[in-house]
Image (cartoon, rainbow, N blue to C red):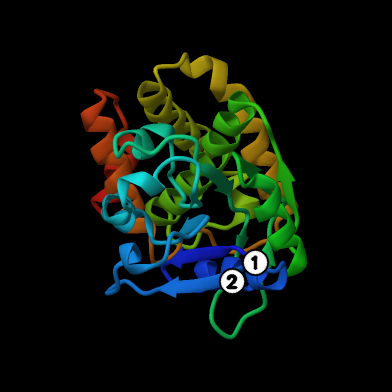
């Protein structure tokens, strides 16, 4: 029997996951922003593919009975408190390391990471569209994967605001001090949210972020989402009493 999967949010990432699920024998129902997911007939899997600013509203729209073991979350800047405060337990979390833009080929930076009850199904679905995905089974591996990806996104986006035109090779080379400082701020904020020792997360995170930058072709960092990313990091820092002078500077640009 083919199972029903819902995909909430039909942007480029949502469409990628929908395509992969269809190719691996799921029946997929797409849910646009103006539609109600609760109108669907009891899906076995619900992929929340909205943007970061829309995640809280999307989680609230999911019927409480569906918040246990059915949801798939894939946003950047994601940490467990964001789903736990909405009564979501045992989600499947995907740390996405590919991007897809209109009229451009998919750009895969490294294998994505999946954790949770549907991790194997998600890895299989991504494999069906020729994208790599590693399944991890322990929470610590998930946390470190999330912190690394969040830090990479924040550091590169904020660097582009602070030094317009800065490139990947400059950030991992002559302007490494900026990368180190931004990484420190991003890790400090996430450690405060996680109630973890920041030093325990920082060294491995910086190594991973630098290694990723060195693997990339030389290109300008940042993007149209950078101002909102900076604003969200500053707001999180304020809420958790962290000092983030560089993020504050980036948010003021």
Residue at image location 30% in from the left, 58% down from the top: 54
Check disc 2 and report its element: helix, strand or loop.
strand
Q: In which quarter of the image is residue 130?
A: bottom right
Q: Residue 117: which quarter of the image?
A: top right
Q: Where does the N terminus fall, quadrant-wise?
A: bottom right
Tell me the residue at 22%/31% (across/down).
238
Nearest to viewer (mark 2 / mark 1): 1
Image side of residue 120 versus residue 146, left or right: right
User: Which label was assigned to residue 62?
Assistant: none
Residue nearest the observer in this picture, 148 or 172:
148
The x, y position of residue 28, in whole percent, is 55, 71
Q: Which of 154 and 114 is in front in this view?
A: 114
The image shows residue 214, relative to residue 140, as above or below, that is below
Which residue in the structure is indicated by mark 1?
2
- Residue 214 lies, in percent from the top left, at 72, 48
Q: In this view, does 231 lie to the left or right of 153?
A: left
Furthest-front residue in this view: 1
Tell me the crowding category of disc 2: few under 14, some 14 to 19, or many 20 or more residues within 10 angstroms, Cα based. some
Q: Quick check: can you spot residue 217? A: no
In the picture, measured across the screen, residue 214 lies left or right of residue 235, that is right
> Which percent across, then down, holds residue 90?
49, 35
Q: Where is residue 194 in the image (x, y as percent from the top left)?
A: 41, 23
Name the quarter where the C terminus is drawn: bottom left
Residue toward you, 105 or 51: 51
Q: Earlier in the sequence, mark 2 or mark 1?
A: 1
Using a 10 Å C-alpha cutoff, classify the residue at mark 1 as few (fewer than 14 neighbours), some (14 to 19) or many (20 or more): few
CB of mark 2 within 8 Å of CB of mark 1? yes
Q: Establish if 68 lies above or below 189.
A: below
Q: Tell me the residue that label 2 is attached to.
A: 27
Residue at image point 31% right, 52% down:
63
182, above or below 219, in the image:
above
């Amino acid at each position: 029997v083919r199972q029903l999967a819902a995909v909430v949010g039909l942007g480029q990432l949502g469409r990628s996951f929908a395509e992969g699920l269809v190719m691996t024998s799921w029946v997929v129902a797409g849910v646009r922003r103006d539609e109600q997911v609760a109108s669907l007939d009891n899906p076995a899997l619900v992929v929340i593919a909205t943007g970061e600013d829309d995640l809280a509203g999307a989680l609230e729209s999911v019927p409480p009975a569906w918040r246990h073991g059915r949801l798939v979350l894939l946003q950047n800047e994601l940490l467990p408190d964001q789903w736990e405060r909405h009564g979501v337990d045992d989600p499947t979390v995907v740390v996405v390391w590919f991007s897809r833009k209109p009229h451009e080929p998919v750009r895969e930076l490294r294998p994505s990471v999946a954790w949770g009850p549907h991790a194997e199904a998600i890895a299989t679905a991504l494999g069906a569209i020729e994208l790599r995905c590693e399944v991890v089974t322990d929470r610590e591996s998930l946390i470190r994967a999330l912190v690394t990806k969040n830090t990479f996104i924040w550091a590169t986006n904020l660097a582009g605001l602070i030094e317009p035109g800065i490139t990947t090779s400059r950030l991992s080379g002559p302007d490494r001090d900026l990368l180190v400082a931004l990484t420190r701020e991003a890790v400090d904020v996430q450690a405060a949210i996680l109630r973890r020792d920041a030093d325990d997360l920082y060294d491995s995170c910086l190594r991973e972020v630098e290694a990723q930058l060195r693997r990339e072709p030389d290109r300008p960092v940042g993007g149209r989402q950078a101002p909102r990313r900076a604003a969200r990091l500053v707001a999180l820092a304020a809420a958790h009493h962290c000092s983030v002078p560089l993020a504050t500077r980036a948010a003021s640009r």
